Image (tube, helix red, strand yellow):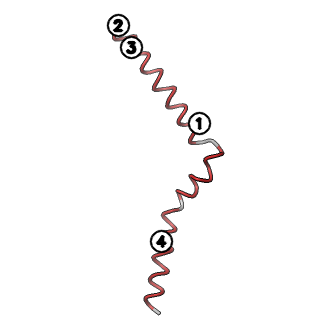
């Protein structure tokens, strides 16, 4: 096997892994956990607002 063949095989393997990761990320069974993770930033802001209101009282 020469260097060109090894490079081609590596490129195909990386492409197949990339497609697999994309399919996994966009599958419907993971959507709920990804949505929860995306909203974690906003949960932290709500806690800060509650702490500010408690300190003002």
Q: Secondary structure at mark 2?
A: loop
Residue drawn at point x = 35 percent, y = 7 percent: 2
Q: Residue at x 44, y 83 (%)?
A: 52
Residue that numbered label 1 is attached to: 23
* Cα gap from disc 4 to disc 1, whole angstroms: 32 Å
Q: Which residue is mark 2?
A: 2
Point out residue 5 in the picture as x, y percentages from the top left corner. 40, 10
Q: What is the number of the mark on residue 45?
A: 4
Q: CA distance from mark 3 to mark 1?
A: 26 Å
Q: Earlier in the sequence, mark 3 or mark 1?
A: 3
| Disc 3 packing (10 Å; few <14; some 14–19; many ≥20) | few
Which quarter of the image is occupied by the N terminus?
top left
Q: Quadrant of residue 3?
A: top left
> Which of pointers 4 and 3 lies earlier in the amino acid sequence?
3
Measured Cα–Cα span from mark 4 to mark 2: 56 Å
Q: Residue 5, relative to residue 46: is it above or below? A: above
The label on residue 6 is 3
Residue at point 47%, 69% (across, down): 44
């Amino acid at each position: 096997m020469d260097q060109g063949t090894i490079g081609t095989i590596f490129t195909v393997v990386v492409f197949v892994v990339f497609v697999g990761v994309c399919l996994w990320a966009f599958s419907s069974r993971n959507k709920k956990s990804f949505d929860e993770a995306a909203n974690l930033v906003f949960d932290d802001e709500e806690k800060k607002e509650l702490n500010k209101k408690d300190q003002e009282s």
